[in-house]
Amino acid sequence: MVIILKNNATQENIDNIKNHLIDFGFQVHESKGVQKTILGAIGVQPDFDTRKIRILEGVADVYRITAPFKLASRDFKEENTIIKIKDVEIGGSKLVLMSGPCSIESEEQIFRLAETVAKSGARILRGGAFKPRTSPYSFQGMGEVGLKLLRAAADKFNLLAITEVMQISQIEVIEKYTDIFQLGARNMQNFALLKELGQTKKPVMLKRGLSATIEEWLMSAEYILASGNPNVILCERGIRTFETYTRNTFDLSAIPVVHKKSHLPVIADPSHATGINDQVPPMARAAVAAGADGLMIEIHYDPEHALSDGPQALLPEQYLELVEELRVIARAIRKDI
Ligand code: PEP
Ligand code: MN
């Protein structure tokens, strides 16, 4: 249930409304917008009479949110969520690029690639240290040694860092080195992990599950938001379909759908969505045109010997050329890089 407050509602009115809601058994979340302040009451019973709230001083309107996700919905928060991390804003007027290798492999590798990322004008360095591999015999990531390298490379080139967390026991160590937690597609419905990340202070980028509907994806975001972390970024990374010519099927339309249904920023990941190097630039361009708030792109200077996801990595020069094209498209839709 959403309670819209009158513009002239006093703090006393707001406290009184909140106390009533708590007494009725609701969990209360406040959303202060430029135009209006909204209270979200979670846990409404179907037979609850909303007039009990409507009559309170300071209340302009009360309505139920019909979507199953509440805090993630545009009904709860009309304005886009802009996540500020140091001097970077995600969800604002600038297109945010998160680029780097699939896995951190060595000091030389991550520093060389961080230099390319910085040169492109991107502000976020990606790199996996704990890798969710289909085969237990594949490279599993460098662990904390890799996290230290990621942090050092990011700091040297004035970049933020993003890296994947696969289980609750890794949160503490990853939090020391990263600026953003990446929650991978395979863990999108790991509800225990979602709740735990909801209790951390750092933003979480939630990738869409391998065969998750948009609603299921937004429900997973809801877990993080309901656990207390308002800084959730969504990432469309392709879904499993019957098509085999691409690794996944890039659901481009998820971008405008999510923008309509939710206030959370949406990043597109054309690398995992296609899985093939030459399909990455066209889908990256399409994602920017479709209004994505940013892109996650994997790069490598020696894809043939990459320890993971080599076939989809762009070479540094291909990546730099792509970013120039993205600048033109971004400008055409009144965004900037
Ligand atoms: C990755 O970003 O390297 C990754 C494993 O992504 P996803 O969870 O989307 O497969
Ligand atoms: Mn990868």
Image: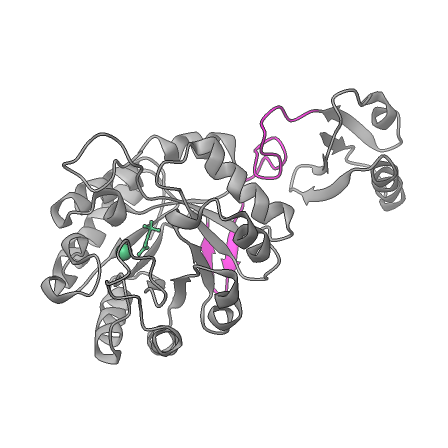
Locate residue 302, reporting x and y percent: 12, 66
Q: Ligand 2 is in which quadrant of the figure?
A: bottom left
Report the residue at 78% width, 27% height from top: 60
From the image, which quarter does the N terminus lie in? top right
Q: Quadrant of residue 279?
A: top left
Q: Is residue 12 left or right of residue 68?
A: right
Report the residue at 52% width, 35% height from top: 262
Locate residue 219, reporting x and y percent: 53, 37
- Judging depth in this view, the residue of 279 and 166 nearest the camera is 166
Q: Is residue 263 visible?
A: no
Q: Is residue 242 visible?
A: yes
Magenta span has 82? yes
- Judging depth in this view, the residue of 162 and 334 nearest the camera is 162
Q: Is residue 232 above or below residue 246?
A: below
Query: Please, which residue is most extreme toward the left here?
Result: 304
Q: Main secondary structure of the magenta part?
A: loop
Q: Is residue 317 left or right of residue 133?
A: left
Q: Quadrant of residue 136?
A: bottom left
Please count the marks in the image.
0
Q: Is residue 165 left or right of residue 305?
A: right
Q: Is residue 29 above or below residue 3?
A: below
Residues in magenta, as a range:
64-90
Locate residue 324, reporting x and y percent: 20, 53
Magenta span has 187? no
Locate residue 326, reporting x and y percent: 24, 47
Q: Is residue 124 above or below residue 291?
A: below
Q: What colour scheme was applied to this rendering of the protein?
A: one colour
